Each structure stands twice: as structure tokens, then as C-alpha cells.
Image (tube, rainbow, N blue to C red):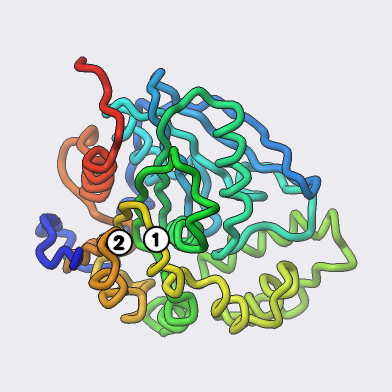
Amino acid sequence: MPVVELSAYRSPLLLRHSHLLTVIPSLFRKVTGVSYVRQRLELSDGDFVDLDWSRTGAERLVLLCHGLESSARSEYIRGMVRALNRRRWDCLALNFRGCSGVPNRLLRTYHSGDTADVAAVIRHIIAHCPHRELALVGFSLGGNVVLKYLGEGERNVPAMLTTAAAVSAPVDLAGSAERLARPGNRLYMRRFLRKLRRKLEEKRALFPDDIHLDDYDRMTTFREFDDRYTAPFHGFTDAADYWARSSSRQFLPGIRRPTLLLNAADDPFLSPSCFPRAEAEGNPRFFLEIPSRGGHVGFVRFFDPQREYYHEERVAVFLEEHSRLKPPDG
């Protein structure tokens, strides 16, 4: 029964509100000591993704997946990279289609259930990289993608992939969308919709007949956005169909590699259905930890800027525990 009932995380006394824990890191955290080398990976459908490498010369590699309208440059990705580099893991941060600062070529972009591009990157790693071991780490939307990939079928998961973790993952997309539609989350929705509008405006220059922004500013929920854009661009009937087919919760029983899901009980983005206790109790390879506080990707620690946040240390330690390879001393 791998449900971690007692989490070690304790939020700072001044940051005990979920919104503060969510907002403060995204606005004020600055991670130093991480540099990237970019690589472009051409995909079989004529599109591409950009990959950002942070190498230490290790035999072990972590592939990281970011959240909605984020990128490898986001501080929470850089913080995770720094924590893993310190423990002698090479890191490869995937920028989902259109998230690297350059518009992707096709009308479609990325979505919460799109595991095909992760699979393409993993095939590239196996074919062209010297690493002997691979782990996956995803945040928010990227966490849902990682969990869905792992649970879709053991035959698709390579032997070198030994362990994984997801942080603040909306494993039930419908529940998360409903939670974000609440009045108390209006500021988050406005921010997401502004970012998504900018992306659509860039794409409209390439596809003027396919992208229409009439009455866009009247939209206030993900249901409206996904009905109008995400679903038709990616082959779904509507938002409900997209959420039903893309949510990772239904795939959790199929996970066969040691995998940690770290979701805070006070996460303002997550509904009760995003805390899959029954699946963790029924799968000895799937570990669920639910700290009472933490917000959304906001497991803050003070006061040393070089100190790792709780989720960074927790994920790194989990990967170490389940790694087949150990780095040399020093």
C-alpha cells in the first residue's frame, strides 16, 4: 500500500496559504547554476521539438516535462535540473511543441495527454545517447503526460527507463478544469488564457483560416477553450472527450516502474479526484504522497537561495532509491 500518509514537508510559517505557496515561487524564485545546450529534434509528422541539455558526464539521464504554457526555462524546471545535476544525473528538458520560443510548424501543438512526443524523444535517446539509465519527471500537465505514458503499456516502456516522478499532476482533467473554473481561481484562469491567446495569435499568422479569435476575451474556463481549440486541433470531439481520453488516472494501474506522485492537499488546481488513493493502494509500483500544504508546484523552503525546494529533494531521493546505477564517489 504505497500511500505516504505522513509527508516530511512543512511550509514556512509565513507561507501557509495555498495561493501564496503557488504564486511566490513563480514570481520571485531565481535559480542559478544551470545552463543549457539546445538540440532540435525533427519529428515524423514534419514538426519539431526543442530539447535543452544540462550535462554532467553521467551515465544516468532524466527527461523532464514542463507544465501548461511553460518551458525548460521555467524556474521549477531549472531547480529540478540543478538538484539532479548535483547528484550526477544528466538532464534533458523537453520543450513541448511551440513552447521553446519558436512557433511549431503545424496547426496542432501539445496537450495534456500527448505522449507521442515523449515517446519520440525517448526513442531518440536510446538510438543516439550514451546513457545507460533513464528516468522521467513531469510537472503539472507534464506530470499527467508522464504518468499516462508509463501506464499505457509496458511494451512501449524501454528497459533502460527505471523510475519516474510527477509533481502537482492533474490526473483527472475534468475535475481539475472544474476546480479552476471556481471564482477563487479566476486569476489563474485569466493568466492561462492570456498566455494561450498570445500563442494563438502567433499561430494565426501561419494558419489564418483555421484560427479565429472572435469573442476570445469572453472565455473564462478551460471547457470553453478546449471545446474551441484543443479538441478540434488534436482530433477530439469536444472538451469532455479530450479530458476523458487524456486523463492519466485510468492508466495508473498499468504503471510497472517505481513512480512517485507528489500532490499537495491544498493545491488550488486539483480536485479530490486528482488524489488517486485506490490506485496507489492497488499498485505496489505507484507511490502517492499528499503533503497537507504545498500549493501548485510550490513546496517552498526558505532562506538559502541555493537550497532545494522540498519537491526537488524528494524527487531526487526517490530516483536515487530506485536507480540501478550509482555515481562514483566525489
Camera-side residue of 46 and 252: 252
Distance between the Cα atoms at labels 1 and 2? 7 Å
Which quadrant of the figure contains the N terminus? bottom left
* Label 2 packing within 10 angstroms: few (<14), some (14-19), many (20+): many
Q: Are marks 1 and 2 in contact (CB under 8 Å)?
A: yes
Q: Is residue 237 above or below residue 75?
A: below
Horizontal and vertical percent position of residue 80: 34, 40
The reply to whether residue 279 is in sight is yes
The reply to whether residue 186 is in sight is no
- Under mark 2, the amino acid is Phe
Q: Is residue 211 left or right of residue 140?
A: right
Horizontal and vertical percent position of residue 44: 76, 45
Camera-side residue of 207 and 302: 207
Which quadrant of the figure contains the C terminus? top left
* Label 1 packing within 10 angstroms: few (<14), some (14-19), many (20+): many
Label 1 or label 2, whichever comes before in sequence order: 1
Camera-side residue of 137 and 22: 137
> At 70% across and 72% down in the image, what residue appears?
229
Q: Tell me how many marks there are.
A: 2
Please name the residue that numbered disc 2 is placed on: 286
Please name the residue that numbered disc 1 is placed on: 255
> At 62% across and 54% down in the image, what residue appears?
116
Which residue is situated farthest in the right direction here? 209
> At 21% across and 68% down in the image, what residue appears?
17
Horizontal and vertical percent position of residue 14: 13, 59
Q: Identify the image quadrant of residue 176.
A: bottom left
- Under mark 1, the amino acid is Ile
Determine the secondary structure under disc 1.
loop
